Amino acid sequence: MSTASKKLSQLKKGDKCIVDSYKDESMQQKMLDMGCLPGEIITIDRFAPLGCPIAISVAGTMLCIRKDEAENILVKQVD
């Protein structure tokens, strides 16, 4: 696992990562409400044809988030 944080929006289909932190407090609350807690593993499942929204799997649940929302989620990629 790398130590540098990346934006969730920078990852590609099939990548796995661990939620590190959130850049925006409102985004943090929204993701916490959906069960996307720091330390949870996220898998990038797919992208819509134009790249937005992004489908992710978190704790056995598929969520769709907009690319601008993914810009505010900092993650550490799992190799």
Image (spheres, rainbow, N blue to C red):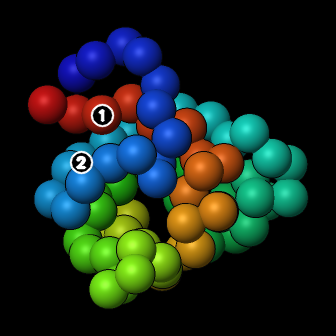
Reading the image, the residue beneath label 2 is 16
Within-10-Å neighbours for mark 2: few <14, some 14–19, many 20+: many
Q: Earlier in the sequence, mark 1 or mark 2?
A: 2
Residue at horizontal 60%, vertical 50%? 71
Q: How many marks?
A: 2
- Name the image quarter holding the C terminus: top left
Classify 26 as above or below 49.
above
Tag 1 near tag 2, CB within 8 Å: yes
Tell me residue 45's x, y (percent). Answer: 24, 71
Tell me residue 6's x, y (percent). Answer: 46, 32
Residue at horizontal 74%, vertical 67%? 30
- In the rendered structure, the answer to whether residue 25 lies left or right of residue 72 reads right
Type of the residue with mark 1: Gln
Classify 63 as above or below 76.
below
Type of the residue with mark 2: Lys
Tell me residue 27's x, y (percent). Answer: 76, 58
Q: Quadrant of residue 46?
A: bottom left
Tell me residue 51's x, y (percent). Answer: 40, 74
Res 66 seen here: yes
Q: Secondary structure at mark 2?
A: strand
Res 41 seen here: no
Q: Quadrant of residue 59?
A: bottom left
Reading the image, the residue beneath label 1 is 77
